[in-house]
Image (tube, coloured by chain):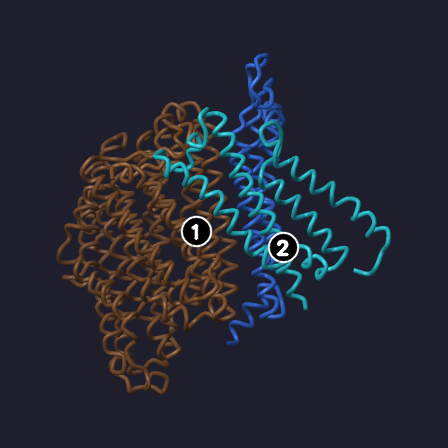
Amino acid sequence: MSALTAQLPGLQVVIPLLGAVLAAFIRRGALAWGWAALITATTPVVAFALLVQVWTSGPISYHLGGWPPPIGIEYRVDLLNAFVLVLVSLVSAIMMPYARRSVAHEIDGDKQAWFYCMYLLCLTGLLGITITGDAFNAFVFLEISSLSSYVLIAMGRDRRALVAAYQYLIIGTIGATFYVIGVGLLYLVTGSLNFADIALRLGEASALYQRPVLAGLAFLFVGISLKLALFPLHVWLPNAYAYAPSFATAFLAATATKVAIYLLLRVIFSIYGVALDLKSLPISAVLYPLSIAAMFIASILAVYETNLKRMLAYSSVAQIGYITLGIALMNQAGLTGGIVHLFNHALIKGALFLALGAIVYRAGTVKLDNLGGVGRTMPLTCAAFVVAGMSLMGVPGTAGFISKYYLIVGALNAGMWPIAFLIVASSLIALVYIGRAVEVAYFRPVSSAVAHAKDPPLMMLVPLLVLAFASVYFGIDTELSAGVAGRVAEILLSGIKVGGAN
Amino acid sequence: MKFDLILRVGVKLMIPFMLLFALYVQLHADYGPGGGFQAGVITAGAVIVYALIFGIEEAQRVVPKRLVEFLVPLGVLIYAGTGLLGILFGKNFLDYSVLGANPPLARERGILFVEIGVLLTVSSTMVALFYAFSERGR
Amino acid sequence: MESFKSLFDHYNYVVTIVLMVAGLYIVIARGNMIKKLIGLMLFQTSVYLLYIAPGKVIGGTPPVLDAKFTVYSNPLPHVLILTAIVVGVATIALGLALVTRIHEAYGTIEEDEIFARDEQE
């Protein structure tokens, strides 16, 4: 048994990878779904085992190929890693039963097996980015997940899905290449590719080569920001989320940007924070205006959207602004707020996009004008939408409130009263666009498109209700989300060179 | 392509040398530029030049589409399977030293196996891409 | 004169930067989808140069173990760039497949025409 637990970090990536390869041999859609569901169900088991192991006995180091770091590639699991691993694998596993009907409805029969193969590859890539401790290995997994997500998006029915996938391809590849340039500059000055080893050597390297180190930070930051859709590098996100198949949108919205945020946290706190004084680097100075711009501008753009999927996509850009604001604050409460919002937002957006997918499954449209009265014909779906929407707004008692609370406390602790005010103000804009959707759903006469719609089948309804319930549950019992996030923030801040100010 | 005698005879003479060179590149990865990806592309190049000169139907008679679609995941399976052997024998993933008594020789053997997997996947992917693109126009 | 000397000493970096900026300019400034992909390829090629050129150690032999030689060129950048090249090939292949499908769906591969047609819907 202990031999198995020693192999858990490797198995976390190997199982979905083998699953994807074997899924490529399958030709029937339903069989492919069953195989994908089986593989996806094993990933949270491994992730939870890793989390328990890290929580009790500290970081795990797994040497790929038996070669010790820094010679070989190392998979390094500490609490931040394990947290994100559990999030990604659990949300994917919860969403899998939903996929069967949704994918069968939106994608032609012979392509369904390939969809599940690409989905498993994307899952492999995301789990790989999270677990690896080697910078170039992270690039390889980043490209694995990105290429498969381009294919997932391009499989949408609408021909605009192709253009959206192409746009995402161009922008995503530029982002990944910027990341490679950043890693290259760090490799040139330190001679190592391992995150921990770079952190050790970066201090003396930056004394000799100050400009390449800063340039490396800039390239890494911009490259990762292109992937996490930080304003103004978010241009690919609205189209990609709007025209992709509903399950693909829900999966990517809940996982892909979160893993990119993990990578940003790793670069800022575990590499540059350990070697240099974070206050001397312009990271916060860049993140503050961009986060606030994201929070306001993206929310306002969401208000003017009539396509509900695009509205939620812009809302995602705004919520990512909250998370990066938490990173910019760089104190205990702020960073806790950012990390716990990473967790909560995955649940909230997962629930919201699953609800929209159910509406597409029954009514065939997500244009707000056609969805009058849908709250009466599809009561459970819209109830889940409203609950998740309230969590998005940050109503007390929901998970969204917990994240906003920590962010406001962090802003006050940093002495930045205007930012605390701005956080509250931008949450009110979410009230406008969610409220408008609620008004159309419940207070308008039933339109023709939704007249014969009813709640989706049980396999689609249960994941939706589970995620909506989770977005409220984690607002009441915060030990698993905020407790772990607080500990993660503590660990990240205790490792940096000049100790984090409170 | 319109029947052209010189091209046909020339390509017929060239293809065996191309395939042999691909095999050479594959197996001499230790001492010179080479390896699975390069060899795979040269092999695919041989099949593609055959398809260009003699026609797609001829090429699909020699290298059928179903074979190509089967080989693409098979190569990755060989690679992942060799890595998995490391786990099955008690060591970490992609540890090739379990494949023999003498660790350096065992690792060389492991790399040979994974490079074969890479060759299969890369060559069949390139040929599959060519088939897919050429069928679009019809 | 000093800056010219250092420029010519580091001309591999100059070439890298020129390729990088040229590739990015093509991606941003051209509306034809295939031209964008070509610009992307050029941009990725500059990154290969960024890694490989500093890998050569002056006076170093290829990294084949032999008793007579002690200084070896660094083999790691070559391995990294092989991976990056394969990733680049896969990306461009996917991009071209998308362009083919877009051409079949829209009849054009100019971005402004495609956006105009989407606006009309």
Q: Colour of chain A?
A: brown
Q: Horizontal and vertical percent for residue B75?
A: 52, 47
In the picture, the quarter occupied by the C terminus of chain A is top left
Image-quadrant location for residue B64: bottom right
* Residue type for callout 2: Lys
Q: Callout 2: 10 Å neighbours few (<14), some, many (20+)?
A: some
Residue in front for this viewpoint, A411 or C15: C15
Residue at label 2? C35
Whether residue A34 is visible here, answered yes or no, is: yes
Residue name at image x 31 percent, y 34 percent = A61
Residue at label 1? A145
Q: Colour of chain C?
A: blue
In the picture, the quarter occupied by the N terminus of chain A is top left
Helix, strand or loop for disc 1:
helix
Residue in front for this viewpoint, C117 or C100: C100
Image-quadrant location for residue B61: bottom right
Q: Is residue A135 above or below residue A401?
A: above
Residue in front for this viewpoint, B13 or A259: B13
**Apparent side of residue A393 relative to residue A157 in the rendered image (left or right):** left
Q: Horizontal and vertical percent for residue C45?
A: 59, 41
Q: Are marks 2 and 1 in contact (CB under 8 Å)?
A: no
Q: Colour of chain B?
A: cyan
Q: Is residue A160 above or below residue A124?
A: below
